[in-house]
């Protein structure tokens, strides 16, 4: 027969195990493995497509994108030169804080889950703001010399 103290200890251990199992992947729980990603353009109404299969027919638009991996995004509008941009996925301040807390409280398993889910990352730049140019504007910009910086004489 089990004593009352042993039964209480067993209940406490089960409760503690339940809490410990619920702590791993804090960033995954609090931040999620995806985020809102917005594309804006001047002029508005441009089509957007991403290298990971997302599309929208007219900017401004917002996607729910996985945080884990970066991607390429192309913004195009008839009569304007298309632009392609690289979106990166990197550790954010909030994600790093969540992961550090997770490792301290939830241990290595929770940290590994957060690292592989992408929950500690943010997509950058977000929002992506694009100014589209006509072919004539693009040609004029290519002919304009880049501004120089620094002191005269290379000093």
Image (spheres, rainbow, N blue to C red):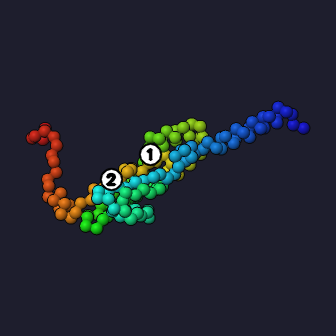
| Camera sees residue 79 | yes
Q: Residue at x 74, y 40 (%)?
A: 14
Q: Residue at x 20, y 61 (%)?
A: 138
Task: Give coordinates of residue 79: x percent, y percent.
Answer: 25, 67
Above-or-below relation of 57 to 25: below
Residue at the right extreme of this rendering = 1
Residue receiving disc 1: 91
Residue receiving disc 2: 129
Quadrant including the C terminus: top left
Q: Nearer the viewer, residue 147 or 105?
A: 147
Label 1, label 2: how far apart the Cα atoms are: 21 Å
Task: Give coordinates of residue 139: x percent, y percent.
Answer: 17, 62
- Element under disc 1: strand
Circle 1 residues within 10 Å: few <14, some 14–19, many ≥20: some
- Element under disc 2: strand
Quadrant including the N terminus: top right
- Quadrant in the picture for residue 143: bottom left
Circle 2 residues within 10 Å: few <14, some 14–19, many ≥20: few
Q: Nearer the viewer, residue 59 or 28?
A: 59
Q: Residue at x 75, y 36 (%)?
A: 12
User: Are circles 1 and 2 on residues that touch, CB within 8 Å?
Assistant: no
Horizontal side, residue 73 vs residue 145: left or right: right
Task: Give coordinates of residue 29: x percent, y percent.
Answer: 57, 46
Above-or-below relation of 151 to 127: above
Labels 1 and 2: the sequence-earlier one: 1
- Observer-side mark, 1 or 2, equals 2
């Amino acid at each position: 027969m089990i004593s009352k103290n042993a039964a209480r200890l067993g209940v406490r251990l089960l409760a503690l195990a339940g809490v410990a199992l619920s702590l791993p992947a804090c960033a995954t729980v609090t931040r999620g493995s995806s985020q809102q990603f917005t594309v804006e353009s001047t002029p508005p109404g441009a089509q957007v497509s991403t290298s990971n299969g997302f599309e929208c027919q007219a900017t401004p638009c917002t996607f729910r994108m996985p945080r884990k991996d970066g991607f390429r995004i192309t913004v195009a509008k008839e009569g304007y030169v298309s632009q392609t941009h690289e979106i990166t996925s990197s550790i954010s301040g909030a994600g790093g804080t969540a992961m550090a807390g997770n490792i301290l409280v939830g241990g290595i398993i929770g940290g590994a889950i957060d690292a592989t889910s992408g929950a500690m990352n943010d997509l950058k730049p977000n929002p992506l703001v694009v100014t589209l140019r006509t072919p004539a504007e693009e040609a004029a910009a290519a002919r304009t010399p880049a501004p120089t910086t620094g002191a005269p004489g290379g000093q």
